Amino acid sequence: MGQHIVRRLMLLVPAWFIMGIIAFTLIRLIPGDPAAVLLGLEATPDAVERLRERLGLDKPLVVQFGIWLSQVMQGELGRSFFLGEPVLQAIVGRLPVTLSLAGLALATAMLIGIPAGVRAATRPNSPADLAIMGLSVVGLSIPDFALGLILIFLFGVALHWFPISGYVALSQDPGAWALHLLMPAVSLGLVQAALIARITRSSMLEVLGMDYIRTARAKGLVERSVVLGHAFRNALIQVLTVVGNAAVILLGGAFVIETVFNLPGVGNLVVMAVKRRDYPLVQGCILLISTIVIVVNLVVDVLYAYVDPQIHYG
Amino acid sequence: MADGLSATEASRPPADVVRSSPGRSLWRRLRRHRLAVAGGTITLVMVAIALASPVLLRADPTTIDVEQILAPPSADHWLGTDDFGRDLLSRVLHGTRLSLQIGFSVLLVTLAIGGLSGMASGYFRLADAVVMRIMDALMAFPAILLALAVMAIAGPAMINVVLALGIAYSPRMARLARAAVLTVRSRDFIEAVRALGARQGRILFRHIIPNALAPVIVQGTFTFAYAILGEAALSFVGLGTPPPAPSLGNILADARAVMRDAPWTIVFPSLALSVTILGLNLFGDGIRDVLDPRMRL
């Protein structure tokens, strides 16, 4: 197991490396002197000269990349032009918002998607199945931010049930935290719920058609334990893959919902950084988000082994 | 369409007759698939409306009318007006047209980058090692954020949106195209063609690619839908199609500020967006059922 994790980590190195090259190239692709670009408009010629030296801009690109990479490894991602704080600090400060949002959205997606998919699979082509599958196609077709706007109008503006923007930290007031995040999480999670429901249904249907399920029924097991104990556990592998994908998509797609609900998260930060051409910040966000995504993929991979004893690593 | 071989079919080389015109039997099966027909019809209607909108509409989508700011739906303005007094119906229709245009352009870019490189790496081992490493790395990153990163370099312009989304959706297309080519090239009839002395180019273009197209077509339909969603999301946060050109995303971005007084400004663009995506999703599902039952979701 441990060996497997190490091997997976080794495989992730090239992925991370390529994202690093993209982030590195980003600054170099922009016309002009990277040092001037990195320091922004108000930089003194003196400061630009110093940074040029530190980045080794007179050296070959490969050497520059090496220097840059070693700085990144030390957590030195530069300083944001507009926020006036180190990039790493800016991102880490906003990470809890995005992680809360993505976590709650994933929970919503799983809580709705998995039971709906199982239910649909146990009675294929029944009215319940058709309704669930119909809803899931519709759910897949409504963009999350449009759903968010409609929820804001219905439950925020018209009914005043939920606050329509802003964020309260979990440590400060758990109730207010949940209240502020509920609508964003539902808008973000519903599309993924639809996807999870579809995959759950199809993999459950596949498993339910197998011989050992007939055996389980023949030996007189209650239907409930056939479905949940025997079938679902084996359908879980495919479901887990989708859930892992969903986690990545939720982390990445959060920026739109964060904009809709004015949540001060990393997504909002990325959008602002791109708009203001705050290149060190854009670079830092790309690196950090790809690192998180890679870690999520790793976690999903390790979970496979727990879910399915047939998978042996190492 | 009568059964039996038509003149064109009969004159085709033997290699194709084996599957008795895949295009035509696909069309027959597709017509019997109710969801595919529904999705195809929705898509065609949206395309027709979008194409006809400049002819049908008197109102210009960018004409500002200060006396009609946030007017509710009426006989003059069927869907009401926005915060600049611009006719919402005409903005939504132009936005839909733009969405479809961008979506289709993105699809072409994705096919050119992802489709071709994927097929090449399925066939040539050397290409495989390089291309797929890069594609795998890109795939580990959420597509929409990748597009955002490209927009950061390229700056806001419509052509850049198309390129950014095209690059972002290419890795998935490449992986699928590669897998499809790999499956086909290991089949017996390819071995047979090779034994008959066919040249590389002929094997690839005449035999492998036509038989590997099914998953690419399916993925293409979904890419079309993703691209429309992606453009709308980018434009919504102000990093996509720049105003005043009406895109469904930036119409909704404008609407966000005024929805308290004018809920119609969010309802109708959202509806247009959802219906377009729904049509493509249903059509994609249908075409997948017909082309490749094993790929069922």
Image (spheres, coloured by chain):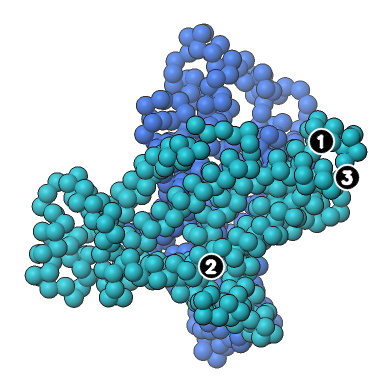
Nearest the viewer among B256 and A123 is: A123
| Protein chain holding label 2 | A
Q: Is residue A109 left or right of residue A32?
A: right
Dot 2 and dot 1 residues touching (CB under 8 Å): no
Foreground: disc 3 or disc 1: 3
Q: Which mark is residue A100?
A: 2
What kind of residue is marked 3?
Answer: Val
Q: Earlier in the sequence, mark 3 or mark 1?
A: 1
What kind of residue is marked 2?
Answer: Ser
Residue named by callout 1? A213
Secondary structure of residue under mark 1:
helix
Q: Position of residue B75 (x, y in %)?
A: 69, 82
Q: Residue at x 13, y 54 (%)?
A: A56
Q: Is residue B203 left or right of residue A83?
A: right
Q: How many numbered marks does the figure carry?
A: 3
Q: Residue at x 25, y 51 (%)?
A: A69
